[in-house]
Amino acid sequence: MSGADLSVMEFADLEVSENVVWIDGTRWHPAARDAVRECSPVIGEGVYRIHTGGLRDRDRACV
Protein backbone atom coordinates (compact mmCIF):
# COMPACT_ATOMS: atom_id res chain seq x y z
CA MET A 1 0.00 0.00 0.00
CA SER A 2 2.10 2.83 -1.21
CA GLY A 3 0.57 5.79 0.56
CA ALA A 4 -2.98 4.52 -0.02
CA ASP A 5 -5.89 6.35 1.59
CA LEU A 6 -7.76 3.65 3.51
CA SER A 7 -9.32 6.12 5.93
CA VAL A 8 -12.87 5.27 4.84
CA MET A 9 -12.33 1.51 4.65
CA GLU A 10 -13.58 -0.31 7.74
CA PHE A 11 -11.74 -3.43 8.86
CA ALA A 12 -14.02 -5.99 10.50
CA ASP A 13 -11.10 -8.36 10.88
CA LEU A 14 -7.49 -7.19 10.80
CA GLU A 15 -6.33 -10.73 9.96
CA VAL A 16 -7.54 -10.27 6.37
CA SER A 17 -4.71 -7.74 6.03
CA GLU A 18 -2.03 -10.23 7.13
CA ASN A 19 1.28 -9.55 5.32
CA VAL A 20 0.09 -6.30 3.74
CA VAL A 21 3.10 -4.03 3.29
CA TRP A 22 2.49 -0.33 3.85
CA ILE A 23 4.45 2.90 4.21
CA ASP A 24 4.30 5.91 6.52
CA GLY A 25 2.10 7.78 4.06
CA THR A 26 -0.70 5.19 4.21
CA ARG A 27 -3.84 6.57 5.86
CA TRP A 28 -5.84 4.05 7.90
CA HIS A 29 -9.41 4.15 9.14
CA PRO A 30 -9.37 5.73 12.63
CA ALA A 31 -10.82 2.57 14.22
CA ALA A 32 -8.04 0.40 12.75
CA ARG A 33 -5.09 2.81 12.91
CA ASP A 34 -3.72 1.85 16.35
CA ALA A 35 -4.14 -1.90 15.80
CA VAL A 36 -2.43 -1.72 12.41
CA ARG A 37 0.53 0.15 13.88
CA GLU A 38 0.80 -2.26 16.84
CA CYS A 39 0.75 -5.26 14.50
CA SER A 40 3.23 -3.93 11.95
CA PRO A 41 6.91 -4.52 12.52
CA VAL A 42 9.31 -2.31 10.59
CA ILE A 43 10.76 -4.08 7.54
CA GLY A 44 12.59 -1.09 6.07
CA GLU A 45 12.90 2.66 6.50
CA GLY A 46 9.28 3.85 6.74
CA VAL A 47 8.03 0.45 5.54
CA TYR A 48 5.92 -1.95 7.62
CA ARG A 49 4.26 -5.37 7.24
CA ILE A 50 1.07 -6.30 9.08
CA HIS A 51 1.60 -9.43 11.14
CA THR A 52 -1.36 -10.29 13.35
CA GLY A 53 0.03 -13.60 14.59
CA GLY A 54 -3.46 -15.11 14.79
CA LEU A 55 -5.31 -12.45 16.76
CA ARG A 56 -8.35 -14.63 17.43
CA ASP A 57 -6.26 -17.29 19.05
CA ARG A 58 -4.32 -14.96 21.31
CA ASP A 59 -6.68 -12.42 22.83
CA ARG A 60 -6.05 -9.92 20.03
CA ALA A 61 -2.37 -9.47 20.86
CA CYS A 62 0.11 -9.03 18.02
CA VAL A 63 3.53 -10.57 17.74
Image (tube, rainbow, N blue to C red):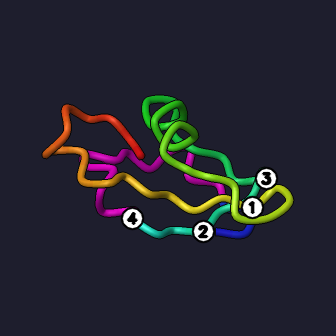
The residue labelled by disc 4 is: 18
Give percent across and percent down for residue 5.
64, 54
Q: Determine the image quadrant of residue 7.
A: top right
Depth check, mark 3 against mark 1: the one in front is 1
Task: Tell us which disc is closer to us: 3 or 2.
Answer: 2
Alpha-carbon span between mark 4 and mark 3: 19 Å
Residue 1 belongs to magenta span: no
Residue 61 image label: none
Whole-number angstrom distance, CA of label 2 to CA of label 4: 9 Å
**Residue 57 found in image quarter:** top left
Q: Position of residue 23 (x, y in %)?
A: 74, 59
Q: Judge whether 5 appears above or below 62 on screen.
A: below
Where residue 45 appears, x then y in whole percent? 86, 60
| Residue, far right | 45
* Mark carried by residue 47: 1
Q: Amino acid at mark 3?
A: Gly
Disc 3 target residue: 25
| Circle 4 residues within 10 Å: few <14, some 14–19, many ≥20 | some
